[in-house]
Amino acid sequence: MPILAASAALGASCCWAAGALLAHKPATLLGPFALTRMQLAWSAALLIVVVSLMGGWQSVAWDQWPAFVIASVLGVVVANISMFACMRRGGPRRSQLLLSMNGPMAALLGFLMLGEVISGQKLLGCAIALTGTALAILYGGNKQDGLEHVRGSMAIMVGLGLLAALSNAIGLVFLKPAMLAGTDPLAANALRTAGGTLVIMIIALWNAPMFAAPEKPGLGLTIHAIIPGVLGHVVAVSLLLYAVRWIDTGVAVVLGSAAPVIMLPMIWALTGVRPRLLAWLGALLAVCGTALILL
């Protein structure tokens, strides 16, 4: 079971890597609020249909409703708006680097709130994996690929990314007891996504200019926005929640934060620009760290 859980977390990283690259253009054109609202609505509808067909609602521990509320507000709405705002300012690689900080945050929260203990070897593996991820992003860029430009203040971009990471970690930690009580991970994901959709639709009733999309989405842009949403909210989050249910939260989140490393060959194939040597060294360190976690 731990091997399957670890594989699920790594699978989530692959989905987030592809989703982040696909979402960069829609995030720039639509803005963080409009993109989050569009992605959540479609993802929630798909998850509700899938869970209903599978009979997953029977597994829900409804007495854990406060956890679902917190996961919806912080883990979905705040985390996604902050992440897309960060991506819009600093590109997909930098946003994924900052989001990967949810691993140490989740490990600390898991220790404080759930009593989870991470062995010294796994802690070392987490540190090496995070170091490799940082190298892969900080030195993985090339101005020729058009993905490394920073818009506005670097400090604000970093703050938004760390807020997204903390909100995501809090949402995952609060959901774990609900899943340990028997809630199927897919049903838990459907509830958090549907709850987040409800919250953001209520906020959207406040017709403020800050929530308006800079560009009106046509059919092509809408499809371009929805696909990474399904990859992230439906596939990746469900895989990560499965991993969180069976292994320590911090370890699962670290394995689920390998997207920046996985992006390297994707960007190479997409842009034809080869990442720097230090980026590949970072990828190697991330793999070594992952091996220590799994041993």
Image (cartoon, helix red, strand yellow):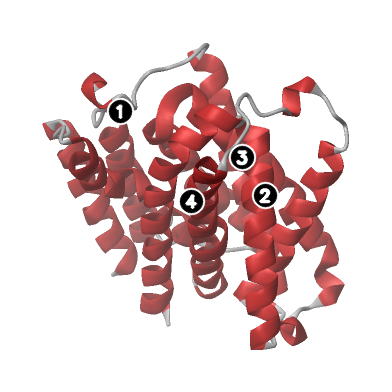
Identify the amino acid type marked 3.
Leu
C-alpha gap between disc 1 and disc 2:
26 Å
C-alpha gap between disc 3 and disc 2:
13 Å
10 Å neighbourhood of mark 3: few (<14), some, or many (≥20)?
A: many
Please report the residue visible at 38 percent of the width from the left and 49 percent of the height from the top.
Answer: 17
Extreme front residue here?
A: 219
Front residue of 214 and 33: 214
Q: Position of residue 274 (x, y in %)?
A: 13, 34
Q: Closer to the N terminus: mark 4 or mark 3?
A: 3
Front residue of 5 and 217: 217
10 Å neighbourhood of mark 1: few (<14), some, or many (≥20)?
A: some
Question: Could you tell me which secondary element the residue under label 2 belongs to?
Answer: helix
C-alpha gap between disc 4 and disc 1:
23 Å
- Residue occupied by mark 4: 228
- Residue occupied by mark 3: 35
Question: Could you tell me which secondary element the residue under label 1 belongs to?
Answer: helix
- Residue occupied by mark 1: 138
Q: Position of residue 91 (x, y in %)?
A: 42, 29
C-alpha gap between disc 4 and disc 3:
10 Å
Occupied quadrant, residue 31: top right
Q: Closer to the N terminus: mark 1 or mark 3?
A: 3
Identify the amino acid type marked 2.
Val
> In the drawing, does residue 6 fall left or right of residue 189?
left
Question: Could you tell me which secondary element the residue under label 4 belongs to?
Answer: helix
- Comparing marks 1 and 3, which lies closer to the viewer? 3
Q: Closer to the N terminus: mark 1 or mark 2?
A: 2
> In the drawing, does residue 98 fall left or right of residue 266?
right
Is residue 113 at all visible to an observer of this figure? no
- Residue occupied by mark 2: 76
Identify the amino acid type marked 4.
Pro
Is residue 18 at all visible to an observer of this figure? yes
**Location of residue 234 with respect to 171 vertically, above or below:** below
